[in-house]
Structure formats: C-alpha cells, structure tokens
Amino acid sequence: MSLIFSLAKSFLKSKKSRTILSIIGISIGFMLLISSNILMSTLEKSNENIVEEKYGNYDLIVGYQKSTLFLNNNDVDKINKFENVQQTSPFLYPYIGKDNPYKKEMELQPMYVGLKNDSLSKEHELTRLSSGHLPGKSEVAIPYSWAKAKNLKIGSKLTFPFPPNKEKTVRVSGIMKKSEYLHSVVLFQYDWLAKATSQDNHVTTLMIKLNDWHVKGQVINQLKEIDPKFFIDGQIKMDKEREQLGGLKPVVQGLNIAVLIGSVLLLISTLQMSIQEKKKELATLRLLGAKKIQIAWLVSSESVIIAILSAILGIIFGIGISFILKDVITKVSGISVESIYIEWGKISPSL
C-alpha cells in the first residue's frame, strides 16, 4: 500500500500544474461549503442569543389565571417527567383573578408574586433587578417607581397584609429595573409567601425550559392532557424571531448541494484526465505484473491525496473567510454578530 501511495505522489508531481489547479478548484468548493455552514450557524447562534436576552431563556408558562385554581405537587411531578422538559420553576400569585376571596382586602395592594431563586426563574423579566438581590425569607423586591417615589432603598422596611393571616413586616432586598409594566408588582420568596398566605404546595403557574424548542407543540399537547383548562403562554413572539432565518436555510442547502456536485464532477474529470495522460505508464505497470486491482488502488490513491489536500485547504480558508465576512453578514442580516460560531457537528457531514 505504501508503494502505491508513493507511485501516486510521483504521478501527481509529474503533472504539477494540473494537480495544483485541481486542488485549488476542489478546495474552493470545500471553502464555500465550510464558510456557508459556519456563517449560517453563526447567524442562528447570534439570533438565538439576542432572542433569549430579549424574552428570557425559557419556552413555556403553564398554569391558571385564578387564585382558586393551581397545580399541585402531582401535576408538577408529571410535567417534570416529560421527556422533553429540561427544567421547571414554580410561581405563586396568591391573590390573582376576579374570583379572589380577598379581593376587597387586596384591591389597594400591588400584585404579589412568589418565586424561587433558581437559574430558570431568573430568566423572567420580573427578576431583572437594578440593584440588590431576589428576596429570601421575610424579604421583598419592589418596583423602581416605588423606590423613587417613596425614597426606599435596600434594607428599608415595609408592612403588607397577607389574608387570611396577619400583616407582616419585610425588608427590601432588591429593586426591579425601571419599567412601565412593573410599577405594581412585588416579589417574595416562593416558600415564604406560600406559608404567609396559607397556600402551601400551590403553584399558580409553572415556568418550563425544554431540551429543544422545536418540540414545543408536542409538550403543549401533553400539558392539555393533564388539564384542558390550562392557560399556556407559548412564547409565540420569541419563536417567530427565532424562525426569521428559516428562509435562508433552503437557499444555503441548495448552494451547498450545487457546490458539492461541482466539486465531485471536477474531481472525476481530473481523474479521467489523469488516466488518459498516463495510459502508457499504466500499460507498462501491467506488463511488469501489476494487477488490475493495484492499478485501481493507484488511481484511487491519487483522488484521495487530492481530496485530503483540498479538504485541508478548504477548511483553513473557509474558516478564514468566515471571520473576514463577519461584519458583512452583520450589515446584510441586521443581526449583531459578536464572534464566529463553528459547529463541527454540522460541518463534518458536508465533508
């Protein structure tokens, strides 16, 4: 086998000009395949990062809009066991809805929200604080407008009613970011608020992160099997922005197929030319006792050498041109690209 490769290299060296031109032509094809995959992956990743920053890195919110309805521990356990559910986080709205039995006592109060201090709940816009930290026991996070209007700061004390139980005094642990939508919401630690309002093990809504957002429809159907009355926020706006690059994929795939076919045809034509030019050499090898299979291996070895060299050059130049075109795709797509994202899992099949 080593002798065959040595002969193949000798034949390629004897026709340097043709070999170099063949490698350049095929490597251009590889370069286009690599760069198109890298740039598409980069756009998708950059767009995903922008969408997550805007809407939060979660996929669904399921539950109720009434304080008299809630998910119990059994419901939450079922949802956590769904194959495509990666993580969940509970929210408690103890006085939500028109049928709230404490409507009169709470009509002048802000909306109470109980949440856990975990990685998923921090993806919700409610938890984005301008200062301080999310509440622990006997603590509260207040709106930015409250802090300004009432001259409140971290450590200030406030008293709130918690029907059917007594009032409690809590310490300000955090101040929310300035927002016109969050001027009448206060945050409490989930377990502490559940005890303060006698609503232990009540989950008004459940925040859900999926393994893959593409299976969202399947998970929604599973949720409806638990209770068809569920209110489900499917983050539709988020999905539409995620899919805005969907129209480019068929175009890129079509170009990749065209480039791949062109590269293969170029390699085949190169081998045909090589065989035509080396008829005398190949005939001599046959006379010296070389078998047909050995001749076939010799020709195949030439193609392998050309393909490997072309692939190496194509990968190097494909990655390089991707970095060069980073600013161009930012201007063309309107998506801010901070760095090039190389997803080898998508690149390797194209090779």
Image (cartoon, grey):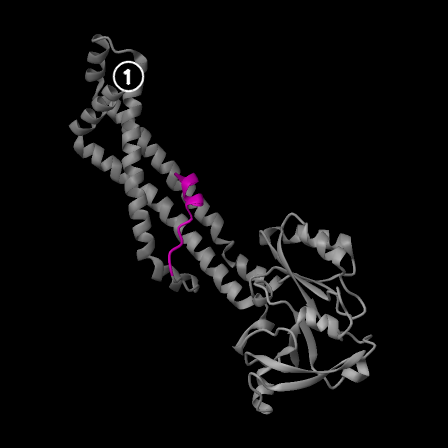
User: Which x, y percent locates residue 282?
Assistant: 23, 16
Q: Can you say which quadrant of the picture contains the C terminus?
A: top left
In-front residue for pair 39/106? 106
What range of the chain is rendered magenta? 339-351
Quadrant for residue 62, please give it: bottom right
| Residue at 59% across, 54% down | 213
The local secondary structure at tag 1 comes to helix
Query: Which image quadrant is residue 152 in?
Result: bottom right
**Could you tell me the amino acid type at mark 1?**
Ile
Asked if residue 157 shows in the view, the reply is yes
Q: Quadrant of the N terminus?
A: top left
Residue 26 visible in the current orientation: no
Asked if residue 82 lies left or right of residue 281, the reply is right
Q: Quadrant of residue 163?
A: bottom right
| Horizontal arrangement in the rendering, residue 182 relative to residue 53 (left or right) | right
Q: Is residue 340 on the magenta stretch? A: yes
The residue identified by callout 1 is 295
Q: Is residue 185 magenta?
A: no
